[in-house]
Image: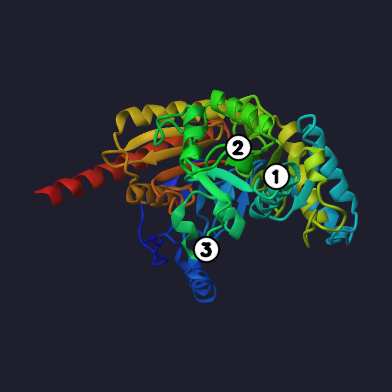
């Protein structure tokens, strides 16, 4: 059962550093009426994050109305790659709204054209057609549609299977959740589409056989052959754990897909725009997918998503047959162009790589001290710290308590519940400084050591 954060204020130690300030009980008493209002008016499912009433967010810091200040390790769930409220993004939004052009449906607008052309120009040759949408889930749904359309065209109606991976998360809409690999998240569907199949993700931790032959074996055991497969979709790194596949595996997968006219789709919703220390996450594999889905960090702010890919695939459907009400919203596109240019101008991809090296070095050093850390996964400024019980069983309670203790100390992350439960996800804005990263790592190490010791003490007491 999912845990919930209490909105009853509790006393916590005061914190006052260059980057953090905790000066009230948490949540701040003056914010409780708003939190209670949200509890009354919104669905319970929205209550899964630390109860910080965001009043202002700038750079890598988040503030509440009471003056408390956190270093943000969430990026608002991997959105604010260029940083919260980046001045260029804010200015672009204001300029676009002042033009009194804030919506145009599918009618052309200059902001959409400018962003689409700039985004396209940075993508690999042969992968440059772009379709702008609203959310990552919508982009995944579109990619699935294109895979099946292409499969039917090249192999007939029997070529319709979408292969994806266990423990994957592709979104919360019907098709995206069927492509997802978390059974609990799709129990509500009941009548699952038999044209979706999952195989183990070759993370090297929970799936120790990372050979491509194992992929083929898993398909064969499900009675699926290459002539039946329309597309293979995977997160460039798995969203719940931050695990990457081996480079050799991905190159073999690319070759297999090409040989059998199967579309390879990399879901870059969490990985793109510098997050992993390269501009696009799939660069780590030395491949180019046929399709990619994008979202989250695409604008560092407003809702925007995209599908990109091969022209012959992207243009399978005729004019007017694929659309989205808010496709290429001009305000969102203005923000996205400003964010993209800021990432390039400020060399945030390189900063992600350098800060990522520091992050992963420190986390791996932690793992060598704490048997409760099963593995550390990720690249650049994304990391997953897998909290485990003996035998690699995920320890969701430990992960939850670590996130809560960090929140009390001025370090903010999103809750791990619902994504395997046992992984603490770390993903600060890409412009975080070395000094701030060092401070936040010290907080994380302290919080983890405290919580791990408390859990051990409880276990020893229970065993007596």
The chosen color scheme is rainbow
User: Dot 2, crowdedness within 10 Å: few (<14), some or many (≥20)?
Assistant: some
Residue lying at 41% horizontally and 61% vertically, measured from the top left: 5
Report the side of 122 relative to 51 (left or right). right
Camera sees residue 66: yes
Camera sees residue 91: no
The Cα atoms of the two marked residues, 1 and 3, are separated by 23 Å
Task: Tell me, for residue 151, which label it has, or none.
Answer: 1
Q: Are marks 1 and 3 in contact (CB under 8 Å)?
A: no
The Cα atoms of the two marked residues, 2 and 3, are separated by 24 Å
Looking at the image, tell me whether mark 1 or mark 3 is earlier in sequence order. 1
Looking at the image, tell me whether mark 2 or mark 3 is earlier in sequence order. 3
Report the front residue among 210 and 62: 210
Q: Quadrant of residue 114?
A: top right
304 up-or-down from 276: above or below: below
User: Dot 3, crowdedness within 10 Å: few (<14), some or many (≥20)?
Assistant: few
Report the front residue among 8 and 395: 395
Mark 2 residue element: helix
Q: Quadrant of residue 443?
A: top left
The Cα atoms of the two marked residues, 1 and 2, are separated by 11 Å
Residue 31 position in % (x across, y down): 50, 66
Residue lying at 65% horizontally and 40% vertically, measured from the top left: 265
Q: Are marks 2 and 3 in contact (CB under 8 Å)?
A: no
Q: Which residue is mark 2?
A: 226
Which of pointers 2 and 3 indicates the residue nearer the eye? 2
Report the front residue among 173 and 41: 173
Q: Which residue is mark 3?
A: 191
């Amino acid at each position: 059962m999912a845990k919930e954060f209490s909105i009853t204020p509790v006393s916590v130690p005061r914190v006052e550093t260059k980057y953090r300030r905790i000066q009230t009980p948490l949540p701040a008493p003056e914010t409780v009426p708003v939190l209670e209002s949200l509890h009354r008016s919104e669905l319970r499912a929205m209550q899964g994050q630390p109860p910080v009433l965001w009043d202002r967010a700038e750079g890598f810091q988040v503030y509440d109305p009471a003056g408390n200040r956190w270093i943000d390790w969430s990026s608002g769930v991997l959105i604010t790659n260029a940083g919260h409220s980046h001045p260029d993004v804010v200015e672009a939004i204001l300029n676009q709204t002042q033009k009194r052009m804030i919506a145009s449906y599918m009618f052309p607008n200059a902001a959409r054209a400018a962003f689409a052309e700039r985004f396209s120009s940075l993508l690999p040759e042969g992968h440059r057609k772009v379709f702008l949408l609203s959310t990552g889930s919508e982009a995944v749904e579109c990619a699935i549609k294109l895979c099946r359309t292409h499969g039917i065209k090249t192999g007939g109606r029997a070529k319709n299977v979408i292969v994806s991976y266990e423990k994957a998360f592709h979104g919360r809409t019907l098709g995206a959740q069927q492509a997802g690999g978390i059974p609990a998240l799709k129990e509500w569907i009941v009548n699952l589409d038999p044209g979706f199949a999952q195989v183990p993700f070759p993370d090297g931790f929970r799936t120790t056989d990372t050979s491509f032959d194992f992929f083929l074996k898993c398909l064969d055991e499900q009675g699926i052959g290459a002539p039946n497969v329309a597309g293979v979709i995977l997160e460039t790194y798995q969203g719940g754990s931050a695990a990457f596949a081996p480079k050799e595996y991905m190159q073999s997968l690319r070759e297999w897909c090409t040989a059998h006219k199967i579309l390879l789709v990399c879901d870059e919703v969490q990985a793109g725009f510098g997050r992993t220390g390269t501009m696009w996450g799939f660069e780590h594999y030395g491949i180019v997918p046929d399709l990619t889905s994008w979202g989250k960090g695409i604008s560092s702010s407003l809702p925007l998503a995209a599908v990109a890919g091969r022209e012959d695939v992207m243009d399978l459907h005729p004019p007017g047959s694929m659309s989205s009400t808010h496709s290429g919203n001009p305000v969102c596109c203005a923000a996205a162009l400003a964010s993209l240019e800021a990432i390039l101008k400020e060399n945030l991809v390189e900063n992600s790589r350098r800060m990522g090296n520091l992050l992963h070095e420190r986390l791996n050093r932690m793992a060598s001290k704490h048997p409760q850390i099963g593995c550390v996964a990720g690249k650049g400024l994304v990391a997953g710290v897998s909290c485990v019980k003996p035998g690699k069983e995920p320890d969701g309670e430990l992960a939850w308590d670590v996130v809560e203790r960090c929140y009390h100390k001025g370090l903010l992350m999103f809750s791990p519940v619902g994504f395997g439960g046992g992984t603490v996800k770390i993903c600060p804005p890409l412009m975080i400084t070395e000094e701030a990263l060092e401070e936040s790592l010290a907080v994380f190490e302290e919080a983890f050591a405290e919580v791990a010791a408390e859990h051990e003490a409880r276990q020893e007491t229970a065993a007596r």
